[in-house]
Amino acid sequence: MRRTAVGERWAAWRRTRARRVRAALWPLLQTATAAALAWYFARTVLDHPQPFFAPIAAAVSLGAAVGQRWRQAVRMMAGVAVGIIVADLIVGLLGTGPIAIGVVVLLAMGTAVAATDQPMFINQAGASAILIVALHRHGTGGQRLVDALTGGASALFVSQLLFPPRPLPRIDNAVAQVLESLGDALRGVAVAVEERRHVDAGWLVELNQRVHARLAALGAARQQALDIARWAPLRRPSLPEVEAARSRAAHVYLLANNVLSLVRATGARLSEDVPPPDWLGGAARDLSDACSILAALPGDADRARARNLALRAATAAAGPEPPAGVIVGSRVRGTASDLLRVMGDRATLHA
């Protein structure tokens, strides 16, 4: 029995690692290609005897998330340039000892910090300055700078020209992640209402953290998709679609605000032993199911079902309510309306 359990854990460990490698394989192949091209060009075309900066620069540039690589490459090249220039000046004054190392790191990173707060720029300024001092050879500063620019250019060539990523799936997947969390939140509301139990404060805190983390990832995905469509020539025709998807995705923030407000309002009523409206459990479950359907990146038939669920929840919340139920009804209608906007539906509701 024990041997079987160990074998199952080992098999699960291998499957996890295999999935991780498969997911990273294509970006790794791109990085390897860019590094090889950078080395070849610097060594063969430019005739630099030890162009190690070129493949390093390419690998560092492509280490960024897809969609951020051109920014990473530009920051890397700028940081390396600052480090090399500062190091060359200091080596001419202080030589290559430990004092020179300390001074060049201080000045190179200080200059970078004064220019920007981007870690890539700052770290590359310090790293390249150290390498110039530690591996100093007279007259090689200019070569190192050209090598770094070669590596960055190689990274841009591979990521922006040869293999630009598709921008729309980045937005779709990020939206799906948020909708998944909001579906869980609404399902929690439905269960709390149906079982007449208090909303756990720890669950509420964890929910807020998860939703806001995924909203931050959505913001990054919206910007990355726009950058890809603008700067990758092969993806530029998709710019109108990306703009439309970004506009729909913007409503996810309003949707999240309504859902979290609904969770808090429901929790407050339950904690005060105020009976929630009879329709609230069913409406919250309908909205949860709609979020789950949309999170699965559905086809037209499923989208129509999600639309009907949202409309049914809004209809249930549209009846007359005592003053204590007005806020809950407004949040349910607002959630339904925002769901329709996320779908790009013109038939939105008045919350």
Image (cartoon, helix red, strand yellow):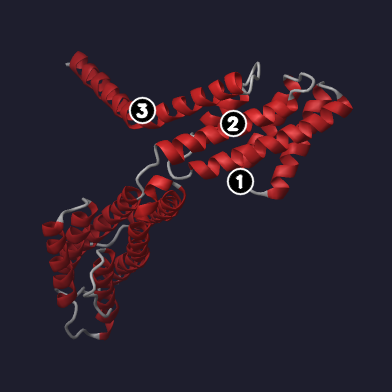
At x 28%, y 58%, the residue is: 182
As drawn, 82 above or below 282: above
In terms of depth relative to the viewer, which is nearer, 244 or 193?
244
Q: Position of residue 207 (x, y in %)?
A: 34, 55
Image-quadrant location for residue 267: bottom left
- Residue 208 seen in render: yes
Q: Quadrant of the N terminus?
A: top left
- Label located before the other in sequence (2 or 1): 1
Tag 1 or tag 3, which sits nearer the N-term? 3
Query: Vertical placement of 258 versus 155: above or below?
Result: below
Name the residue carrying label 3.
25
- The residue type indicated by label 2 comes to Thr
Tag nearer the camera, 3 or 1:
3
Vertical position of residue 252 compared to residue 71: above or below:
below
- Mark yes or no: residue 206 visible: no
The residue singled out by tag 2 in the image is 150
Q: CA distance from mark 3 to mark 1?
A: 27 Å
